[in-house]
Amino acid sequence: MIYSLSRYLAQLDVPGAGIFQYLTFRGAAAIILALLIAMVFGGMIIKLLKRKQIGESIRDLGLEGQAAKKGTPTMGGLIILGAILIPMLLLADLTNIYVQLLVISTVWLGFIGFLDDYIKVFRHRKQGLDGKFKIVGQVGLGIIVGTVMWLSPQIVVQEVQHTDRPIADATVKTTSTTVPFAKDVELDYGVFTGEKGHNGPLTWVLYIVWAILIITGVSNGANLTDGLDGLNTGVAIPIVVVLGIFAYLSGNIIYADYLNIMYIPGTGELLVFAAAMAGALIGFMWYNGYPAQVFMGDTGSLAIGGVIAVMALMIRKELLLPVMCGVYVLETGSVIIQRVWFKITKKRYGEGRRVFLMSPLHHHYQLKGFHESKIVIRFVILSILLAAITLTTLKVR
């Protein structure tokens, strides 16, 4: 809204209107606005949630401090979603297909998470929304994202001519993606279907399936990580910052040429979204840090993970997700290992055995006697380290 108005005012030579045309300025404005919205309106929303008695029902898992969390307001993800979407509507270029897809992804997964939280709170079903319905929703979003990236004429990659003044000399629609730590090497999904080079229908079916797997995996990983005060919030912030940096560089032809990475026109606008999301998460941390005054619930966790996955697909960095989202991988992996080993040992020995004291992994450390604030800090530090390693892939190739 403000962005569109500023373009109109800039054409009329209104002094200062052109400043909103700069991505860096709009990114800075987005993070400040999102932070203020989350902090100022977050308190009001928490009071409303308390008044409506929208509190968390806690399963007794025998964990220290667990009983004290009972009744803490949930559905706090509404604070995050509002703090992301309002700056986007005001400051982003809403004609940009990448922005449109991210807004749809945020609302889509936020709504699925909201239904899950609603059923838990108001229908008193601790399991919430049936897992199959969550999967259907995630699959549906994967189909939408994959199809739009296939059909939209705006989603292209331009080859960069390596000269002192780089220019785009070819525009192509491609399913190729960046291979981490490898120079001048891109993975074309067509190599798996025998359609390499021209991206036929089988390649795009494969790509849609791949998009579904990425979105489902990361959103569920974020959901599993949301188990301690401030954990998922703190882990997600470095990931979002790195994705914003990658988006800005990929959308700038000069930086893309210098770093020898894909130049993807239009992805620079994702910097505004990443900035708004980072600001929203930091602002939410004001209330979600230990001891939490509000939980994000599935309303926030599913949306956070899904948006991270969609952004990575857009800027062709999905193969870096196991590194930058390493904490999500550890949390999800611990659950898978625990369940598989329990079933194997039950079949072999008549009773199930466990690798971890409890899964996901953060509960294992709780039962080992670590205070939850220490666990959160160490997981966040690990996420920052993994984010830094991800950034090194720009030069270590």
Image (tube, helix red, strand yellow):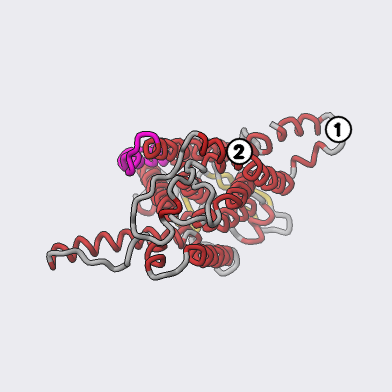
Please state the horizontal and vertical placement of residue 122, each as a whole percent of the image: 39, 34
Secondary structure under tag 2 reads helix
Q: Amino acid at mark 2?
A: Met
Please state the horizontal and vertical placement of residue 12, each as a whole percent of the image: 84, 29
Q: Quadrant of residue 342?
A: bottom left
Question: Is 127 displayed left or right of 69 in the figure?
Answer: left
Indicate whether 152 appears above or below 247. above
Q: Quadrant of residue 345?
A: bottom left
* Majority SS type along the magenta span: helix
The magenta stretch spans residue 205: no
**Image mark for residue 44:** 2
In 3D space, how far apart are the residues under numbered discs 2 and 1 (Cα atoms)? 40 Å
Residue 336 in sight in this render: yes
Q: Amino acid at mark 1?
A: Asp
Q: Residue at x 36, y 42 (%)?
A: 205
Q: Residue at x 48, y 59 (%)?
A: 325
Q: Residue at x 58, y 49 (%)?
A: 287
**Image mark for residue 13:** 1
Magenta residues, start to end:
122-144
